[in-house]
Image (cartoon, grey):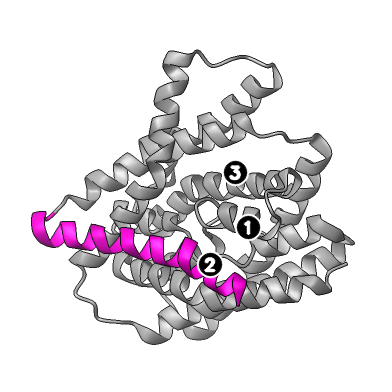
Amino acid sequence: MTYFTHILLNNVIPLTIMIALGAGLYRAFKLDIKTLSKLNFYLFSPALVFKMLYESELTMSLLGQTLIFFLIYFAAMYLLVELVMKWRGYQGGMVTAMRNSVIFYNSANYAIPLNQLVFVGDAFTLSIQIIIMMMQSLLPNTYGIYSVNAHKQDPKQSLKTIMTLPIIYVIPLAFLMRGLHIPVPEPIYAPINYISNAFIATALITLGVQLGSMKWQLRFSDVMLSNVLRLLIGPAVGFVVVWLMGIQGAMAQALVLSCAVPTSLSSVLIAVEYDNEPEFSSQVVFSSTIFSIFTVTIVIYLMKFIS
């Protein structure tokens, strides 16, 4: 009950309040969703990723093993969702929207606080989650954008779009500066801190604005299918992957927990920015965040069986 109450009070309710504020602001002022989306892609998200990677303490051994886990897990979930979509007969933009809702998950503003709650501020498990966050920041801004535009525009144009995104330059820059112990001048680091601190609020308000602008024609079966794949099948696949890799202890628990979080806000931002099933994507993010209070609690309980 302690986990349940803490997740409710410290994750779900604060997220819901921010989303509700965004919806209310849209109703009152008709905020421009495209402007908010661009702020997230080109300003707030890159600043957050740079700050967290630059300040983290990662070893090459931990980085390598975590990346291997992530790639196997990502491939397994990708294959699974492809089989499900083929069975369901999805076509057009819905294929990308469903896929993104399952393979892109909230590894930053949900998973990092959750990690630190469960492992009581452990630096080792936080480093694992930061690596997952790095990959979950990079992939939506590369593959995610390419897949959304694949059926709309020439691949060269999609690649050109991807190359304009700061996130693909921020990640190697953060690693390089951290590895070479290059300090960031305070007049530059202070704005990075301010901007990164604004990421969560801006992303959630963006989701709220999108929800406030929707007609709310609930696509129950599609939304619930995505929720089941992300919240139930996702952590189950994580359990299998750590078992196959022979990973044990705190690392195994941290990796499984990283697979249990709800759909990422990135899926909404991509859907809005490139007009690809934004209503479905918004409904999935909102519902998976609410349902995760129950599913994450179950995963945390089952983690004690990982030795």
What secondary structure is found at the residue carrying circle 2?
Answer: helix
Magenta-tinted stretch: 1-30
3 vs 2, front mark? 2
Give the left or right position of residue 114, taking residue 243 as reference.
left
What percent of the width, then of the height, locates residue 104? 53, 59
What secondary structure is found at the residue carrying circle 3?
Answer: helix
In the depicted structure, whether residue 282 falls above or below residue 149:
below
Residue on which the image places disc 2: 7
Give the left or right position of residue 75, taking residue 88 as reference.
right
In the depicted structure, whether residue 245 falls above or below residue 216:
above
Residue on which the image places disc 3: 134
Residue type at the position of mark 2: Ile
Look at the image and say whether residue 15 sits in the magenta stretch: yes
Q: Earlier in the sequence, mark 3 or mark 1?
A: 1
Residue shown at 52%/30% (left/top)? 170
* Front-most of residues 274 and 24: 24
Q: Are marks 2 and 1 in contact (CB under 8 Å)?
A: yes
Q: Quadrant of residue 64?
A: top right
Q: Main secondary structure of the magenta part?
A: helix
Task: Determine which of the numbered discs, if any, sits on residue 85 in the image.
Answer: none
Residue on which the image places disc 1: 117
Q: Quadrant of residue 138?
A: top right
